[in-house]
Image (cartoon, rainbow, N blue to C red):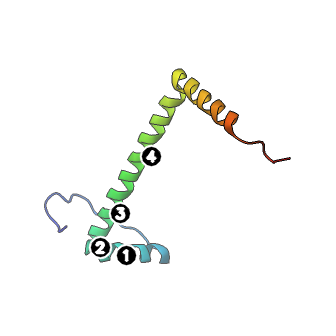
């Protein structure tokens, strides 16, 4: 990605050795420091959005009494089939 009129802001960061290595890795894929930082931001934000969506889904499932009852039934069935542990 090259500079164009949509780029509205510059961000500066002090990088330690680990971050410098991470930037070098991303720069190899993205082509420049700026493109690498934008790529890292997009990927990180997408990962956080997925985690937030999963967290919301888990919260909804935890409040669904029918789903919880079905899960308890399945667990009871599994426990009934499981061998004694430790064996005698």
Quadrant of the image occupied by residue 11: bottom left
Q: Are marks 3 and 1 in contact (CB under 8 Å)?
A: no
Give the mark nearer the N terminus: 1 vs 4.
Answer: 1
Give the mark nearer the N terminus: 3 vs 1.
Answer: 1
Give me the disc on residue 25.
1
Quadrant of the image occupied by residue 79: top right
| Quarter of the figure with the N terminus | bottom left
Q: In the image, 34: left or right of 77? A: left
Give the mark nearer the N terminus: 3 vs 2.
Answer: 2
CA gap between label 3 and label 1 equals 11 Å
Q: Are marks 4 and 2 in contact (CB under 8 Å)?
A: no
Marks 3, 2: nearer the viewer: 2
Residue with the mark numbered 2: 29
Vertical relation: 72 (above or below) 25: above
Which residue is farthest top? Answer: 66
Residue with the mark numbered 3: 40
CA gap between label 1 and label 2 equals 7 Å
Q: Are marks 1 and 2 in contact (CB under 8 Å)?
A: yes
Give the mark nearer the N terminus: 4 vs 3.
Answer: 3
Q: What is the secondary structure assignment of the residue under circle 3?
A: helix
Give the mark nearer the N terminus: 4 vs 2.
Answer: 2
């Amino acid at each position: 990605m090259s500079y164009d009129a949509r780029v509205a802001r510059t961000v500066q960061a002090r990088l330690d050795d680990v971050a410098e290595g991470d930037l070098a890795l991303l720069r190899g894929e993205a082509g420049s420091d700026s493109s690498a930082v934008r790529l890292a931001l997009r990927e990180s934000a997408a990962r956080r959005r997925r985690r937030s969506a999963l967290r919301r889904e888990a919260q909804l499932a935890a409040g669904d009494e029918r789903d919880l009852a079905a899960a308890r039934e399945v667990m009871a069935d599994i426990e009934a089939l499981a061998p004694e542990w430790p064996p005698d």
